[in-house]
Amino acid sequence: MDITAAVVTAVGGEFLLDKLSLDGPAADEVLVEIAGVGLCHTDLAVKEGHLPFPLPGVLGHEGSGVVVEVGSAVTKVQKGDRVVLSFNSCGTCPQCKKDSPAYCHNFMAFNFSGVRPDGTSALSIAGTTAGSNFFGQSSFGTHALAHERNVVRVTDPTAPLALLGPLGCGIQTGAGAVLNSLDAEAGSSLLVLGGGSVGLSAVLAAVVRELSVIIVVEPIQSRRDLALSLGATHVIDPAAGPLSEQVRAIIPGGVDYAVDTTAIVSVLEQTLLSLAPHASLGILGVPSDPTAALSLNLIQAQVLGVTIYGIVEGDSDPDRFIPELLALHQAGKFPFDKLITTVPFTQINEAVAAQHRGEAVKIVLVHE
């Protein structure tokens, strides 16, 4: 079928709206008409060449919409179902068999290769093959092909379908870091580095888990204000002084948990100085420099008993975790919609610029 999609033709270039040909679904695939798709830092990291993906290609990995057609082997969803699209996984490796698909042994091939597992691409432009299957979906378009493993059915008919896509990546990453990866204890303390959608999703999860101290470090005043309105107990402007000194002015013994979304080495070094004994640090951000490395003082780490976690997708199994987040939202305990600003899909480049300027926390591109 013919679709309209936002295409990246060269590293660092703008998204170009173009007509493409999209294959029909293979046996395990699901064709989805996209209602909305989140604009994520990972999409922009690929566009800028920080992560691999074949160009020209179609990105987008926080899609939501309605199932149009299913492949012959698909039993999980059917035509007309409302779905959220998440990351893809193989289902057969040791981690997938342990219900830990975020650490699928084939994660890069299934999410960044630009082709289906059989090596074919579902997208073409004027007969020329285009990179597709980004995170098993490439949802920056009017329609996307996903896989049975990375679609999650939405059973609540009142859920705002066009806004749900970020649950498949950014929101589940931040919330999952607190609820799954770190499994933060009620009454404990949390430091969140960065007040974007991932960091503020961690704040929402910390409120759900009833943490007593929730500190957000963020340079933009409006995001600090939003963090407080969502349940953060304290906010820090990193320009006001050394981070570790500001944290310890709030909680002298240091924090029990920290979640970093910045991937900035100097920020992480200050975070290590802000930790309490037996604290845990979760690293979520994607560095602009893929060779970036964190220097760890071995004595300090040993004496404090610090644990450092690299976290992918919040250690989430989307089939389980996304429905849990939706149930919390329905109960009024996880208002992720307060993070979202909607922008027409045709204004994708304007949306990128607005998000870069900090004018929005999480932009969802919606089809009019």
Image (cartoon, rainbow, N blue to C red):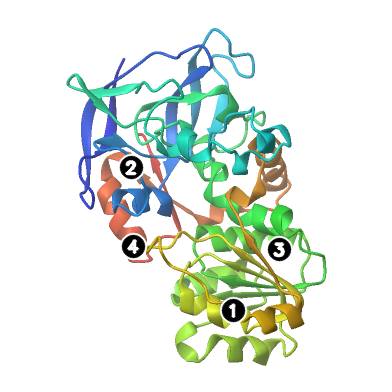
Label 3, secondary structure: give it.
Answer: helix
Q: Position of residue 316 (x, y in %)?
A: 66, 44
Q: Are marks 2 and 3 in contact (CB under 8 Å)?
A: no
Q: Quadrant of residue 309?
A: bottom right
CA separation in Å, label 4 and label 2: 17 Å
Residue visible at 61% across and 43% down? 103
Q: Position of residue 235 (x, y in %)?
A: 58, 79
Label 4, secondary structure: give it.
Answer: helix
Mark 4 highlights which residue? Answer: 356
Mark 3 highlights which residue? Answer: 206
Residue visible at 33% across and 66% down? 357
User: Residue 344 shows which numbered tag?
Assistant: 2
User: Residue 139 shows which numbered tag?
Assistant: none
Q: Amino acid at mark 1?
A: Thr
CA separation in Å, label 3 and label 4: 26 Å
Q: Position of residue 327 (x, y in %)?
A: 72, 42
